[in-house]
Amino acid sequence: MTADLFSHHGDQLRQRQAPLADRLRPRDLDDFVGQGAILAEGRLLRRAIAADRVGNLLLHGPPGVGKTTLARIIANHTRAHFSSLNAVLAGVKELRAEVDAARQRLERHGLRTILFIDEVHRFNSAQQDALLPWVENGTLTLIGATTENPYFEVNKALVSRSRLFRLQALEPEDLHRLLQRALSDSERGYGDRAVSVTAEAAAHLVDVANGDARSLLNALELAVESTPANADGTVSIDLAIAEESIQQRAVLYDKQGDAHFDTISAFIKSLRGSDPDAALFWLARMVEAGENPRFIFRRMLIAAGEDVGLADPQAMVVVEACASAFERTGLPEGLYPLAQAALYLACTDKSNSTIGIFEAISSVRRAQRQDVPSHLRDANRDGDAFGDGQGYRYPHAFREHWVAQQYLPTALQGEAFWTPGRQGWEGARRDRLLERRAAQLAAAAEAVDDHPLLVSSGPEQPQLERWLQRQLAQDGERLQELRRRLWADLRWQRTDRVLLVGGRSLLWALDPLAAACDGSVAMLCGSSQDRDRLEAQITLLDPLHQPMLLNGVEGLLQLDPEHRFEVIGGRLNQEDLALADLDRHWASVSDRASDTGRLRLLISTPELGPAAALLALGQLKPEQLASGERRQLDALLALESTWLNDARATTALQAALQRAGWSLSQERWQESLRLPLDQPLIERWLGEGRPYRRRLDASGPEAAACAPLLRRWLEAHRGRTLPQRLGHLRLSGARSRG
C-alpha cells in the first residue's frame, strides 16, 4: 500500500514537472491535432486503430508532428500489451528482455504484445536483425517511429513487413489550435494563470516552429516561465519575447539525408515526366550542393533503361557517351555533357516496357514445369537419340526471316511478358508483334492432339485463357484504356476516400484501391445481386483493404458524418441514368463529398443498333428483301436512330449534378469495335426483358412484330463479327463555390 502511495505521488510530481509539450499530449484520436490525411474519418489507419487491428507500423516524419503521441493513443485503444523502448537508450539486452516477456505473455495468456520503438533508425544493423525473427513469427507487433527515411535507415526486411505512414509537418492552423489549447487548458496548460500572447507573437511562434508542435510548445513554455508578471499579475508575451524564445533553423542539403534522396527523386521524376526545365533546376541544385556527378550519371543510366527503354534505344548510348565525355573533361566544362544527357532523357519518347523482365522472373520462380521444348534443345550432345532438335524451323529459311513455332515452355505457352508501348522505336513494332503472337498461338494449336489443354480454357491454363481473351477480343486493353480515360488528370492522394457509383464490378475499383492505399474505397451497390457479386470478388483481398459495400444511398446515411469523400466516380449504365428520383439520388451522394471533392463519371452508349450493324456488315441487302421485310427494316432503323440519338437521360443527369453543387466539364470520344455475333449477343438484344426488346414491345404491335424477323437475320449471320461504335462521355466535376 505504501509503495502504491509513493508511486502515485511520484507520478503526480512527474506530471506537474513534465515539459508543457509532454503534458499536452493528446489522449485519444479526437484530441489529436493535424494529420487528417491519415487519421480523418474513413482513413485506413483510423479504421485499423478503431478495430484494434494495427499491424506492424513505421511512422516517419519530422520532429514534433505526433509520432510518439500516436503510438500512445494506439496503446490506449488496443487489447494487446503495450511496451516501449527508446533506441537511443536501449541495447540488445533490453530488446531480448522485451522479446522474452512478449513470448511468455503469448504462450501463457494468449496476449499479444505491441512494442513501440522510438528513434528506431538509431538501432544498428545487429539490433534490427535481432528484432526481425520475432516480428516475422508474430511474437511482437512493431510500431517504429523515425525522423529518417525508413527505406534508407531501417532494415529492408523490417520495412517490407510493415506499413509505412508518413506524418507531415503540422499546418499553421493546427499550431494555432495547439497554442490556444495550451493557454486555455487549466489542468495541463496555462489556463489557471493569466497569460496574454499578442497576435504578432503568436504568428511568429507558429511561423518559426515550421510545423513542429514540440518546438512551438517549448518556446511558449520558455517565454511564459522566463517572463515576470506585470502589476496585475498577467504574463504578457509580445513579439520581442517571442523572438527571444524561439530560434530559426537552417535548411541544408545533406548528402546523406532526406534532402539528398528527395532531390534526386524530383530529378528522376522530372525526366520521366518529360519536363526539361524542372530537370535542369534539380540538376543545378545537386551540382551546386556538391553532389557527385558520377552518382547523377548512374541514376540517368538507370532512367534510360527504366523510363525510356525501347521507345528510344539510343538513350542509353547518349547517356553513356556523355558520362565518358565528363570523365575526359571534368568540371566545370563537364556541365555540358551532364546537361546534355539530362535534356535528352527529358525530351525523348518514354516507355517502361522493360519491366516485363520482372514478370518473367516471377514466372520462372512460380512455374512448376519449365522444360525446354524438344525442338529447341541442343541436338549436338547425343540429341538424336532422344529426338532433340527435331522439328525446329530455321527462321532465316523463311520469308521475313520469321516463322511461327513454339518457343516458350508448354506450361507457359501464350504468356505475354513484354507489352510494347505505342511510341518511338517499339511503337513501330507493336502491331507486328501482336500479329506474330496470334500466329504463335495458331502454331501451338498444331499440337492439340498431344496437348489438348493448350488451346482450351481450364484451371490448368488460366494464363492462356486470359491471353486468349486479350488476343481475340482485346477487352483487356480496351478496358484498361477506358479506366485510364476515366481517371485521367486526377491527381490521386494516398489518403483519398473514394466513393464508386455504378458498382457492379471490382474492375473499376482497381485504380482507386491502388492509388488511395492509405485512404478507403466504398462502392455504392444498386441491388442485392450487385452486392453478392462484389462480395464474391473481394474475398481475396485483405480485410482492411477491401472496399466498403454500401446498400444504395441509404448506406451512406450509416457512415459517420465526418466521413467525406475526396473522389466520387465510376462507370454508369442505362439503369443508373433511368433512376426514378435522379435529383434525390445525386443530392444524397453529393452531400457526402468533401469541400475539395472531385467527380469523374463515364457513360458509354452504343451508336449502332443490331439492324444498323447488320446493314453496315454488308451482308444484309435491302434490295433483296421482300417489300414487307424492307418496310420492317426501315422501321427498325428509324426506331434505333431515335433511341440512340436520345440525349435526354444524360442531359437530365448533368442537370441533377449541377443542382447538387457540381461544376461540370465534359469530354466525348468514339470507339470502333467488332462484336462476335453469337447466341449470347443475340439474346442480349432480343431476350425477354432485355432493354432493346422492351423498347420494341413498348413501341407498338408493328415494332414488336419485327423481333422474330431481326432474330432470324442475326442467327443467319452467326459466326461473323458485327461492326459497332460506342460513344463515350466523361463528366468531370468540382464542388461549386457559392
Image (cartoon, grey):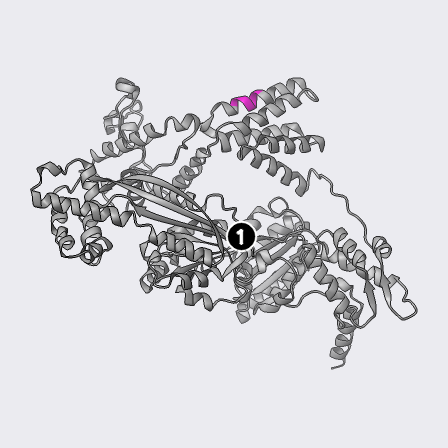
SS at badge 1: loop
Splitting the image into 4 quarters, where does residue 260 fall? top right
Lateral position of residue 580 relative to residue 446, left or right: right
Tag 1: amino acid: Arg
Start-end of magenta stretch: 317-321
Relative height, residue 470 to residue 566 (above, below) = above
Mark 1 highlights which residue? 161
Q: Nearer the viewer, residue 392 or 667?
A: 667
Lateral position of residue 142 relative to residue 332, left or right: left
Relative height, residue 1 to residue 15 (above, below) = below
Residue lying at 33% horizontally and 50% vertically, measured from the top left:
647
Location of residue 462 in the rendering, given as x and y in whole percent from the top left corner: 30, 46
Q: Quadrant of the N terminus?
A: bottom right
Relative height, residue 30 to residue 160 (above, below) = below
Any part of residue 677 in sight: no
Residue lying at 66% horizontally and 23% vertically, measured from the top left:
335
Splitting the image into 4 quarters, where does residue 372 fall? top left
Question: In the rendered structure, does residue 318 fall within the stretch colored magenta?
Answer: yes
Q: Nearer the viewer, residue 45 or 246?
A: 246
Q: Nearer the viewer, residue 102 or 54?
A: 54
